[in-house]
Image: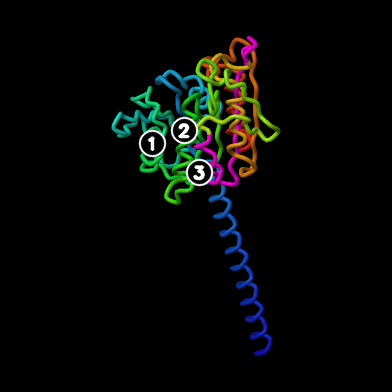
Amino acid sequence: MKNISNTTRNVMIIIITVLCVIVAILILKANANNKMSNNNTHIPTFYLHGYAGTGNSMKLLVNSAHESTNVKDVVRAKVSKEGMVTFDGDIHFNAKRPVVDIILEDNTNKDLTKNAQWIRNAIIATMTQYHFEKFNFVAHSMGNQSFSYYMLNYGNDQHLPRLNKQVSLAGNFNGEVDINGLDLDVTLNNKGKPNLMLKDYKDLLTMKQRYPKDAQVLNIYGDINDGTQSDGRVTNVSSKALEYLLGDRIASYETFKVTGAKAEHSELHDNQIVIDKINAFLWEKSR
């Protein structure tokens, strides 16, 4: 009887031990899944206007993001000429996919290094009220040049969140129609490398090393079909030259061409086809 009792006790101990191990594994797995879910959904998306842009510039894009993703947290980050950031609105600490619309007070400043600092300030200010490790960025026109300088100067800063997805809209990387782009007769090879490079473009050639290898980029440009192969301001080859600046460093790179009257430079961010494409790129695969 004593031996039977000892055997039973040993069996019970083994059963309890196995159950404890199973429970521990389940808890660890649940925590890992929750952490992965938080990492996928706690990703803010920043929007930045172009030259002389205002709070209305990216309004339709921001509003559509709010509607299509059921985002409740949409704020404006206003950056003063001195680089001070103030918010209109608050982001809940547990918000999913919040939207931050960056508005630069000095909206005609062509100092791209300074603009990159203002983007950095807006991101850091957002970090004070919302924890995130990755972010998305959508920029129009000169906002893309400013963001390029952000990536060049701060893209590998370990104290800052990493880029997740980027949308370049009407980016002018290597010349404009009414300034120099058309006159240069620029062509691209099969890797997007221009046969002629402006100084601002050459300055960005090392930018690719600052990009995370898992980053994804969508490059949208317009052609108004007037013979200039441009959106009326930026040549298509100038926008498409982004490819060579990124090379094969990142996880994915996609171009999207829009044609017609609504493909005009200042119309692109209000084009419904463009809006739908951007929203699908940013969030459909993340849901």
Q: Give the answer, above or below, for where 266 lies relative to 220.
A: above
**Secondary structure of the residue carrying numbered label 2:** strand
Residue shown at the point (60%, 19%) measured from the top left: 222
Q: Give the answer, above or below, for where 29 lies relative to 120.
A: below
Give the extent of the magenta segment: 202-228
**Secondary structure of the residue carrying numbered label 1:** helix
- In the foreground, 67 or 148: 148
**Secondary structure of the residue carrying numbered label 3:** strand
Residue 195 in the image: state x and y as whole percent: 63, 30
Dot 3 amino acid type: Lys
Tell me the crowding category of disc 1: few under 14, some 14 to 19, or many 20 or more residues within 10 angstroms, Cα based.
Answer: many
Q: Quadrant of the C terminus?
A: top right
Residue 94 in the image: state x and y as whole percent: 44, 42
Check residue 174 for magenta coloring.
no
Tell me the crowding category of disc 3: few under 14, some 14 to 19, or many 20 or more residues within 10 angstroms, Cα based.
Answer: some
Residue 103 in the image: state x and y as whole percent: 39, 26
Q: Which residue is mark 1?
A: 122
Check residue 219 for magenta coloring.
yes
Query: In whole angstroms, how far apart are the C-alphas of marks 2 and 1?
Result: 9 Å
Dot 2 amino acid type: Phe
Q: Are marks 1 and 3 in contact (CB under 8 Å)?
A: no
Dot 1 amino acid type: Ala
- Residue 93 is left or right of residue 209, and the answer is left
